[in-house]
Image: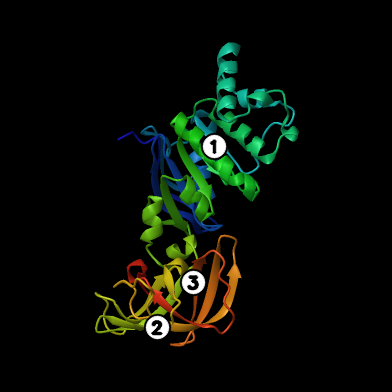
Amino acid sequence: MPANKLELQDITRVYDGVNVVDGLSLALKPGEVTCLLGPSGCGKSTSLRIAAGVDRQTSGQVLIDGQVVSDQSGHMPPEARNIGLIFQDFALFPHLNVERNVGFGLKGSNASKKARVCELLQKVDLEGYVHKYPHQLSGGEQQRVALARALAPKPQVLLMDEPFSGLDDRLRDDVRDATLELLKSENTAVLLVTHEPEEAMRMADQIVLMRSGRIVQAGAPYNIYNSPVDRQAAAFFSDVNVIEGVVKNALTETPFGQFLTPGMVDDTEVEIIIRPQHLKLDFDRKGRGPNPTVTDGVPARGRVKRSRYLGHQSVVEFMMDYDSSVLKVLVPGVFLPKVETAMWLSMRRDRCFLFKK
């Protein structure tokens, strides 16, 4: 296993008596992207600033290559840590052209510096832009210049704080893909801060989900998405349907029949969570589609409350006959049934999450 390039050990940061970061620990390895994900104000940008050295933790340690660079007894300044930084606004020097922006701060001979600049500009597909200035570049081009400049000194670690938020949707995916390819080619350990789940899923080898200054779950994107630790974690990545019930004899009554809730004592209030794409529509209104499975459970009838077309899929909201609760279903393509149309829904029980309320 590769050695950790950056470690945060039991980091706490207190502002005005509030633990903005509360006992955070994580490790970054070469060639891997770790994403700090969470809502605004959860402490992720503060954690990144502590890793960079521009802020100092109240307690805990920061290590680079196994060496302590910040603790209660000492604090290495940012410029001595061999860490690259990219922020939301890119912070390019407006009076320097692309070549000089990328080469700013590089040490060595002019020939070696020029070779490194040319290598990186080629990797970000900007080799013909050496004499242009930042104001002559698009947002996506400025982002790639900022990335090349941050990687030019070959930092051990690259810290990125919402680096793609200023790009429009049409550019964002292409720039993220190009960035990820370059980071992997440079074998850089990356800490990326974002509040966008889709970006984290697309970019990260490891997602660290934060809430109120603490890590609530960490792991590979697939595991985080498919095994959330609680309702809030599930809902952070997509819309969810919530079916509430009370346990009786290890069973909970739902619109879709009895749901097994083993290990729950009687009278425990529970929430059964299912994503809209895992509810199925039964068009024959008999409660079974053409290929029912044992995981579909008992069908339940609802009436269309509203439907919307989202471009590549449609979302249909149903008011259920069972308890007047509203459930959302995602349907591929265009599907816009009339309001009050009655249909049968089936629930993929193997795709449900069960939590205490």
Q: Amino acid at mark 3?
A: Val
Q: Secondary structure at mark 2?
A: loop
**Residue toward you, 67 or 277:** 277
Quadrant in the picture for the C terminus:
bottom left
Is the residue under label 1 in contact with that under label 3 (CB below 8 Å)? Answer: no
Closer to the camera, 208 or 253? 253
Within 10 Å of the Cα at label 2, are there few (<14), some (14-19), or many (20+) other Cα atoms? few
Q: Check disc 1 and give the amino acid type.
A: Ala
227 relative to 297, above or below: above
Which class describes the residues within 10 Å of circle 1: few (<14), some (14-19), or many (20+)?
A: some
Q: Identify the residue at horizontal 54%, vertical 37% (top origin).
A: 178
**Residue 329, numbered label:** 3
Which residue is depicted at the point 50% across and 68% down? 330
Q: Secondary structure at mark 3?
A: strand
- Label 1, on which residue? 178
Q: Nearer the viewer, mark 1 or mark 2?
A: 2
